[in-house]
Amino acid sequence: MMKALYNTIAAACLATAAMASPLALAHATLKNASPAAGASVDAPPKEIALTFNEKIEQAFSSITVADGAGKEIAAGKARVDADNPAIVRLALPALTAGTYTVNWAVAGHDGHRRKGDFKFTVK
């Protein structure tokens, strides 16, 4: 009797875990950044391009860039790429040599908002 109860509980736990795992993977995850996190580039980039593992919702997504002093650089609104909605782009003004911090926030099709940041350097 106890063994049957134990087996039933174990099976229920495994089934719950199996059903929940796709939900955990459903959030937008950054796959690639240009310039890359930690990169040191010779030429200033004209834009930030972030590639995620799923389509991104324009209305709930943003990218900001700050200089080494923490001052946000006015560069307009980030936009989801029309040809590939998993890419979000932000046009940049002419950058000078220095270290920059990219802060991003996006929402995927599930509506969950994800945030992150990274630095890159212009030589």
Image (cartoon, rainbow, N blue to C red):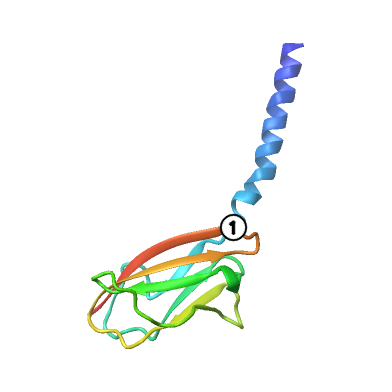
Side (left or right) of 56 relative to 5: left
Side (left or right) of 4 relative to 110: right
Question: From what the image shows, is residue 110 above or below residue 81?
Answer: above
Which is more toward the observer, 71 or 39?
Answer: 71
Residue positioned 63% across, 46% down in the render = 21
Q: Position of residue 102 (x, y in %)?
A: 37, 70
Disc 1 target residue:
112
Q: Position of residue 100 (x, y in %)?
A: 30, 73
Q: Position of residue 101 (x, y in %)?
A: 33, 69
Residue positioned 60% across, 64% down in the render = 108
Side (left or right) of 82 relative to 37: right
Q: Quadrant of the C terminus?
A: bottom left
Q: Quadrant of the N terminus?
A: top right
Amino acid type for the residue under numbered disc 1: His
Which is more toward the observer, 2 or 88?
Answer: 88
Residue positioned 61% across, 70% down in the render = 57
Number of callouts: 1
Residue extending furthest top? 1
Side (left or right) of 107 relative to 7: left
Secondary structure beneath dot 1 equals loop
Mark 1 Cα shell of 10 Å, populated few (<14), some (14-19), many (≥20): few
Q: Quadrant of residue 86?
A: bottom right
Q: Position of residue 81 (x, y in %)?
A: 57, 80
Question: From what the image shows, is residue 70 above or below residue 79?
Answer: above
